[in-house]
Image: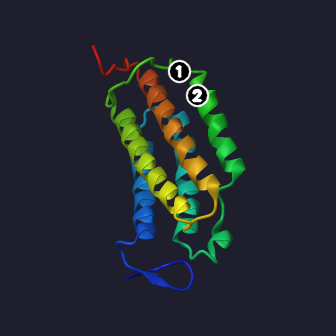
Amino acid sequence: MTGMLGEGRLPKYHPRMETVGTLDEATAALGLARSLVQDAALQPILLQTQRDLYGLMAEVAATPENAEKFRSIDAARVDWLEKETDALTEQVEMPKEFILPGETQGSGALALARTVVRRAERRVAEMLAEGELENQALLHYLNRLSSLCFVLELAENQFAKKETRRAKE
């Protein structure tokens, strides 16, 4: 059993705890990426997303009656992600087909972080569908964060002067 933020305990295998664990993995994956990216301009963006995920994780870990006390993800945070993604998208060439991750350690770590964020998004979507969460902004944030991770990967490859490889040759 494990404690929630508020009164109550849940089995460690409960979907809420699985979601919290996946968000924790996403935060760690973003931290790994932050430590490996060569483009220093990407580091503050990654640091802010890690901080945002900690707030998101607190809301998910809270009992339903306490969740609002921990709410830090809202439309403004989603807008921030969209602006960061749009600004970077203007600076990189967007591929027209699937790409292979791993041109640099940093871009490979960003690709891994994107996949963990996508899993966290699926967990949050499930909790929202089951009525375990109410804040739709959590889902929107994670969806936009995965897009940001993809664009960050492209930006890191471009900074390192590495060609992004297509999945099909």
> Residue 24 in the image: x percent, y percent?
43, 60
Q: Are marks 2 and 1 in contact (CB under 8 Å)?
A: yes
**Dot 1 surroundings within 10 Å: few (below 14), some, or many (20 or more)?**
some
Front residue of 114/156: it is 114
Extreme-front residue of the structure: 130
80 relative to 120 in the view: left or right? right
Residue 132's tag is none
**Tag 1: amino acid:** Val
Depicted 29 relative to depicted 63: above or below: above
What amino acid is at disc 2?
Leu
Residue 168 visible in rendering = yes
Checking the image for residue 88, the label placed there is 2
Q: Quadrant of residue 101?
A: top left
Residue depicted at x 41% and y 58%:
22
Q: Which residue is mark 1?
A: 92
- Residue located at (64% from left, 37% from top): 82
Please name whichever residue, 146 or 64, is drawn nearer the observer in this view of the structure: 64
Seen from the viewer's position, the closer of residues 44 and 147 is 147
